[in-house]
Amino acid sequence: MRLGDIGFRILTRAAAITVLVILGAVILSLISGSLPAWRAFGLNFLIEERWNPVTERFGALAPIYGTLVTSFIATLIAVPVGLLIAMFLTELCPMWLRRPIGIAIELLAGIPSIIYGIWGLFVLAPFLQQTLQPFLIAVFGEVPLLSSLFAGPPYGIGMLTAGLILAVMVLPFITSISRDVFEAVPPVLKEAAYGIGCTTWEVVGHVVLPYARVGVIGGVMLGLGRALGETMAVTFVIGNAHRISASIIAPGTTISATIANEFTEAVGDLYTSALIALGLILFSITFIVLAAARYMLLRIERRIG
Amino acid sequence: MNPRYAARRRRNRIAMGLSLAATLFGLGWLVMILGALLWEGFNGLSVAVFTEMTPPPGSAGGLLNPIIGSLILTILAVLIGTPIGILAGTYMAEYGRYDRLTSVVRFINDILLSAPSIVVGLFVYETMVAPMGHFSGLAGSVALAVIVIPVVVRTTEDMLLLVPNPLREAAAALGLTRAVVIQRVCYRAARAGMLTGVLLAVARISGETAPLLFTALNNQFWSLNLNAPMASLPVVIFQFALSPYADWQKLAWTGALIITFTVLALSIVARSTQASSKQS
């Protein structure tokens, strides 16, 4: 009896340690797998733009650039929209509608990323090619500075389309965390603001947002972490072009899309190793972003709890 | 009405209008995606989809082998991942509620929860596929299990923390050992919530594609051999959707419809079990 008790305790402790071991093993395997690439290219790998499997010259700059740009576009769209939805759900929406709308937005997070991909390729990309992109080219084509952002023919697929799809995919994360921290604002604070005659918008802008700031930033970074590592949806619509172009409607590539597209076809150790090195870079970036997000969310949890 | 007040009211009305528009925008995507799936995938739905193998380009066929493959991979992944997840969650909520290990594990687990799934694929490739020398269904389910574990750890810990302490104290007062208290009392009290965690994990992995691409790979033929490449619905959708053949693309849409509604049904069931356990 006593032995079984200790045994169960040890078993659970071992399982908890397994979680740490998994993370350690992921990091170690990525490092050991990418060693040949680091040996061959050194840190130049990070700033080299060329990616040529034939001559075995590899550089990670184009995928890194694509990953950052698409995630930036996604955050730029998803943050205001997510905050506005959270405001709608906490301040404006009638009580009986809050739950259904909240669940519907969260269902967006449940749709698998491959579905976003197939939908983005066959429905969204042709639509953007015919409507939004010609419009952007026509409006900004003559404006200095902005014109290079929207240069080139409307392909449909490209950075902008990938960013837009990513925005929809991270929207539910940002919305639900923002809603939760908005709801955690003490009612007394809001009532006091309403009491001195503030409008709803002023209450949200001057009382709710400042109070919930840390939590909202945590939620945004959590969404950003998702966007950086998102693979399948991006692979469908990014266009897989290993180049850096200033235009956001041009095709590009991201770290995850490069790996997904080329890994099974990679011949030669150096090619495989370069792809694993990309994986290591991606994991490092997302690890930092996610760790920062968790740290901020922990802080707000402590304040609420 | 003084003009300053009017301006404030106007600004407020614009902001409220924008928030309504944002909500409709968010809901619009859901409607458009589900609508497109039904529109493109529904007329492809037939008995043949569930009884025939994936066809070569240009001929009719179904999705039987990837559907079975997905089922096997998912079930195996849950069988591997759930026990580890539940035990780890148990340690964090019961034995080590206040120790340092728990807070470290919780932090790391939360990061694993949103880590890019393609990296998990690379990890399993490096540790299983490369040493074994070939792709296999087993490697695919291990990759999925790595995704299952953090989900189950999280929900198990959360649900066990909700179990009121007097229950534990009452059971301990009867002379039960800690392990028996946990297994017979705490697990039973937290059962619905823990089941929700497993359902959420199933919903999460049944649409996962990236970790399977270079672990389970794909298989055009009927195969139940776990030591060989295995077809799965998401990978087949990926391959067929990007192919130039119209009938493959049609099958991809049908597969997408099946996956999406399975996943959404699972998450709705998971949510409702959670809601009912909260009420009782």
Image (cartoon, coloured by chain):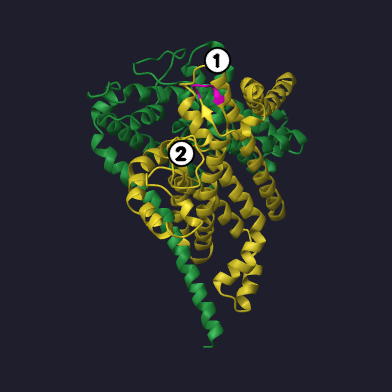
Chain colours: A yellow, B green
Q: Residues within 10 Å of mark 2 (few under 14, many from 20)?
A: many
Whole-angstrom CA distance, mark 1 to mark 2, is: 27 Å
Left or right of B72 in this view: A227: right
Inspect this view and state whether residue B172 appears: no
Instruction: Mark yes or no: residue B224 visible.
Output: yes
Q: Are marks 1 and 2 on the same chain?
A: no
Q: Which chain is mark 1 on?
A: B
Q: Residue at coordinates 48% horizontally, 46% vertically from top-left?
A: A163
SS label for mark 2: helix
Please, which residue is most extreme toward the bottom here? B1
Disc 1 marks a residue whose amino acid type is Ala
> Between residues A199 and A27, which one lies in front from this camera angle?
A27
Q: Taking A49 as reference, is B15 above or below it?
A: below
Q: Which residue in the structure is indicated by mark 1?
A: B130
Q: Is residue A268 magenta?
A: no
- Rendering coords of residue A297 (x, y %): 66, 49
Q: Secondary structure at mark 1?
A: helix
Residue A234 has which mark? 2
- Position of A157 compared to B201: left or right? left
Instruction: Classify A253 as above or below A54.
Output: below
Q: Position of residue B81 (x, y in %)?
A: 56, 26
Q: Nearer the viewer, residue A16 or B24?
A: B24
* Image: magenta residue range: A53-57
Q: Quadrant of residue A23?
A: top right
**Residue A257 place in picture, x, y as percent:** 48, 34
User: Which residue occupies 27% across, 22% down?
Assistant: B55
Residue A292, which numbered label?
Answer: none
Amino acid found under the numbered disc labelled 2? Val
